[in-house]
Image: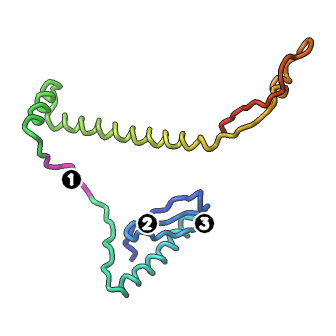
C-alpha cells in the first residue's frame, strides 16, 4: 500500500500534469492526465525507495493528516492578559471569545494581504503582455474628414494595447 502524499497540478510550461511527492524532494512525474502523472510518480517513488534501501538510508515518514482538538495553551505577558480581559469585558464577551475574534480577524487580514500580493504579482507580470503597435498620424486620423489641406506631419506615433 502506497502511503506517501501525492500532489498533482497542471503545468502550462510542461503542457502536462505534474505529480510531486513532498516526502521525496526533487521527485516529480508527468502525465497527459492526472491519473497517469500519479502512476508515474508512484513508479519514480519506488525507484527512490529502492535506492534509499540499497544505501541503507532511513525512508522518510509519510505525511499524515493531523486532527486538532481546538484547544491550546497560551502564555501571555500579564499586562497583555489584563488588557485583553478588560477589552473582552467592555465588549460583553468572554476572554476566550475575544481572543478567538482577534485571531480570526488577524488571520483573515493576513489571507487578504496574501491574495492582494498574488494579484499584484499577476498584474506586474502583465507588463510583459503589452503589445506595441506603431502607426502614422495620417493612419490615426484617416477616419476624419478634412476641408482643405491637413496641417499634420506624418511622424510615427506609438499606440499601446494591453491584451
Numbered tag placed on residue 157 in the rendering: none
- In the image, taking residue 106 as reference, residue 143 lies left or right, namely right
Q: Secondary structure at mark 2?
A: loop
Check disc 3: other Cα within 10 Å, few if <14, some if 14-19, many if 20+.
few
Give the colour scheme of this rendering. rainbow
Do tag 1 and tag 2 residues touch (Cβ < 8 Å)?
no
Q: Earlier in the sequence, mark 2 or mark 3?
A: 2
- Alpha-carbon span between mark 1 and mark 3: 41 Å
Please tell me which residue is depicted at 88% across the width and 17% down the height of the picture.
150
According to the picture, the residue beneath numbered tag 2 turns out to be 6
* Vertical relation: 51 (above or below) 129: below
Between residues 78 and 105, which one lies in front from this camera angle?
78
- In the image, taking residue 128 as reference, residue 101 lies left or right, namely left
Does the segment drawn in magenta span residue 70?
yes
For discs 1 and 3, the disc positioned in front in the rendered view: 3
- Alpha-carbon span between mark 1 and mark 2: 26 Å
According to the picture, the residue beneath numbered tag 3 turns out to be 32
Main SS, magenta residues: loop
Please tell me which residue is depicted at 26% across the width and 57% down the height of the picture.
67
According to the picture, the residue beneath numbered tag 1 turns out to be 69
Does the segment drawn in magenta span residue 69?
yes
Between residues 29 and 157, which one lies in front from this camera angle?
157
The quadrant the C terminus occupies is: top right
Check disc 1: other Cα within 10 Å, few if <14, some if 14-19, many if 20+.
few
Q: Secondary structure at mark 3?
A: loop
For discs 1 and 2, the disc positioned in front in the rendered view: 2
Q: Earlier in the sequence, mark 1 or mark 3?
A: 3
Residue range highlighted in magenta: 67-74
Amino acid at each position: 500500500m502506497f502511503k506517501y502524499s501525492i500532489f498533482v497540478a497542471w503545468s502550462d510550461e510542461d503542457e502536462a500534469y505534474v505529480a510531486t511527492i513532498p516526502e521525496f524532494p526533487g521527485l516529480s512525474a508527468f502525465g497527459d492526465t492526472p491519473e497517469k502523472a500519479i502512476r508515474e510518480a508512484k513508479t519514480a517513488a519506488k525507484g527512490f525507495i529502492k535506492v534509499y534501501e540499497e544505501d541503507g538510508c532511513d525512508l522518510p515518514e509519510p505525511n499524515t493528516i493531523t486532527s486538532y482538538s481546538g484547544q491550546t495553551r497560551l502564555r501571555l505577558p500579564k499586562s497583555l492578559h489584563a488588557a485583553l480581559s478588560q477589552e473582552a469585558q467592555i465588549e460583553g464577551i468572554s476572554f476566550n471569545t475575544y481572543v478567538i475574534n482577534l485571531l480570526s480577524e488577524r488571520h483573515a487580514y493576513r489571507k487578504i494581504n496574501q491574495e492582494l500580493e498574488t494579484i499584484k504579482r499577476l498584474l506586474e507580470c502583465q507588463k510583459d503582455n503589452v503589445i506595441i503597435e506603431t502607426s502614422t498620424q495620417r493612419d490615426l486620423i484617416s477616419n476624419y474628414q478634412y476641408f482643405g489641406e491637413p496641417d499634420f506631419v506624418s511622424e510615427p506615433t506609438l499606440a499601446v494595447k494591453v491584451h
